[in-house]
Image: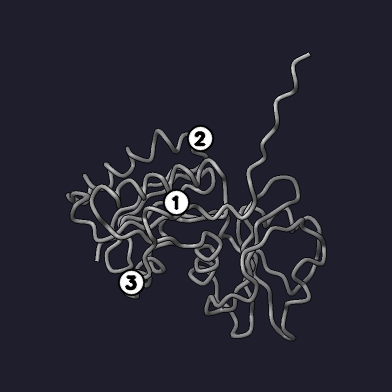
Amino acid sequence: MLILNIETTTNVGSVSLSKDGFTWVLIEEKDSGDHAGQLTIFIQQILNIADKNLSEVDAIAVSEGPGSYTGLRIGVSAAKGICYTLEKPLIAVNTLKTMAYAVGLYHTIGVNDIIVSLQDARRMDAYAAVYDKDLNEIKASFFLTLEPDSFLDLIPEGAKLWVCGNSAEKWKTLLSDPRVIFSNVKAPSSRFLEKLSAEAYENKAFEDVAYFEPFYLKPPNVTKPKALL
């Protein structure tokens, strides 16, 4: 099972080719400001390194959001274009879930612990989701303004709350609670999609290529032009 995984929801541009849920080739650039220009280059480089053609890939997986409006459009458009042209299945994975999955790769999570993924939405706003140790949703993706007591009422007695994502540091400045642990998982990556996209492929959880849209969660900020005098 070969899956091309695409992540462009933040300033990290990341593409990987996974085999049976494990990384085969990964190309990633942090603080990338040009997903549109780099994504096709990364994909071609991945295929060259693996000595594969796109036609040999079994599916295309994309991080569906929430995240940057522009980044989401670029990643999803590229994934849909490949799937449509080559008649490959499209897999979409929630970005917040991929980071929650990554927390378990780097930390030992207690049985009753919960994981909060926070994706930056500017100022003190964030996209968030809450999961248990097995990535079952405790609270599905939502938009919020971070407060000192956000999520604290969700912590089971004797358990801890793990926080990941590029908005975690903003919340960290608001509180001091020994039950809250801030993970070193700061940003999404295509390598965090790989296990989840492999599971989706095995379960045939594919998207409709023609109608699939990114998961924006919140509409982009659009400034109306001022009326001419």
Q: CA distance from mark 2 to mark 1?
A: 14 Å
Residue pictured at 41% horizontal, 68% vertical: 196
Q: Which residue is mark 3?
A: 204
Q: In x, y percent, where is residue 52?
A: 18, 51
Counting residues from the N terminus, which is met first, the one under dot 3 or under dot 1?
Answer: 1
Residue kind at label 2, given as amino acid type: Gly
Residue 33's disc is: 2
User: Residue 185 is drawn in which quadrant?
Assistant: bottom right
Counting residues from the N terminus, which is met first, the one under dot 2 or under dot 3?
Answer: 2
Residue kind at label 3, given as amino acid type: Lys
Q: Is residue 224 left or right of residue 97?
A: right
Mark 2 Cα shell of 10 Å, populated few (<14), some (14-19), many (≥20)? some
Residue 7's disc is: 1
Contact (CB < 8 A) between labels 2 and 3? no
Residue kind at label 1, given as amino acid type: Glu
Mark 1 Cα shell of 10 Å, populated few (<14), some (14-19), many (≥20)? many
